[in-house]
Amino acid sequence: MLIIKNCFENKSYILFFPHFFRYWTSAEETSKLCQRVQNWEERINPILEEEEQRREFDIHRYESELLENFDKLGEDKPFYGLLRKEAPSYDISRYFLASLTLSNTGNIELISSLSSNNFTEVSNELHCKVIKLERHHEVFDDSNVSL
């Protein structure tokens, strides 16, 4: 307190005050930032804990599960018909990603069919048609190519 009093008495507070003000403003902003980070952590931690309880995401396993639903080449099935009956909602996006990679590697063809029921109900359903069962990653795994 003596230092501050002496600063004001000597009129050197003109030099001191901007630094003091900048320090307190910075400390206040840091405190607000810490509070925002803490709030974010409180929201994200339960989500991360829930994610830890889910089965591991292995794209090849999801692709295999999709392909196992087909009995023969050329067979066409709706996407939702390929999902496991007990599949949780988070698995739908994983299966969709697997279907996109299977389409990209030429294993399945994705077909979008638009239908309407007397113009009162419109539905857009995704179908999958199996083209080949030979898996792209298995071809490379089986070959004895060294890099």
Image: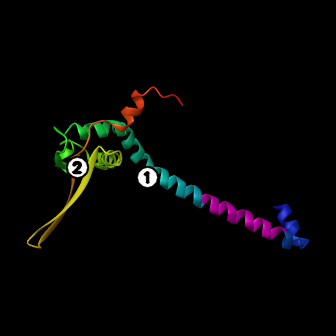
Find numbered disc 2 in the image and state the secondary structure of the residue it sits on.
strand
Query: Quick check: marks 1 and 2 in contact, CB under 8 Å?
Result: no
Where residue 66 appears, x then y in whole percent?
Answer: 25, 41
Of 45 and 62, nearer the camera is 62
Where residue 124 appears, x then y in whole percent?
Answer: 20, 62
- Amino acid under label 1? Arg
- Amino acid under label 2? Cys
Measured in 3D between alpha carbons, the distance from the residue under mark 1 to the one under mark 2, in whole angstroms, is 37 Å
Give left or right: position of 75 versus 105: left
Magenta range: 16-31
Local packing at callout 2 (Cα closer than 10 Å; few below 14, some 14-19, many 20+) is: many
Given this view, does label 1 or label 2 mark the residue nearer the observer? Answer: 2
Q: Which residue is mark 2?
A: 128
Where residue 96 appears, x then y in whole percent?
Answer: 30, 49
Q: Residue furthest right?
A: 10
Q: Which mark is residue 101?
A: none
Local packing at callout 1 (Cα closer than 10 Å; few below 14, some 14-19, many 20+) is: few
Of 16 and 140, nearer the camera is 140
Find numbered disc 1 in the image and state the secondary structure of the residue it sits on.
helix
| Residue 52, above or below 15 | above
Of 83 and 90, nearer the camera is 83
The reply to whether the magenta stretch includes residue 125 is: no
Kindly indicate the quadrant of the structure image that contains residue 20: bottom right
Of the numbered discs 1 and 2, the one sitting upstream in the chain is 1
Where residue 7 appears, x then y in whole percent?
Answer: 87, 68
Q: Residue furthest top?
A: 144
Q: Residue at x 53, y 58 (%)?
A: 36
Q: Which residue is mark 1?
A: 43
Main secondary structure along the magenta-highlighted residues: helix
Give left or right: position of 98 versus 18: left
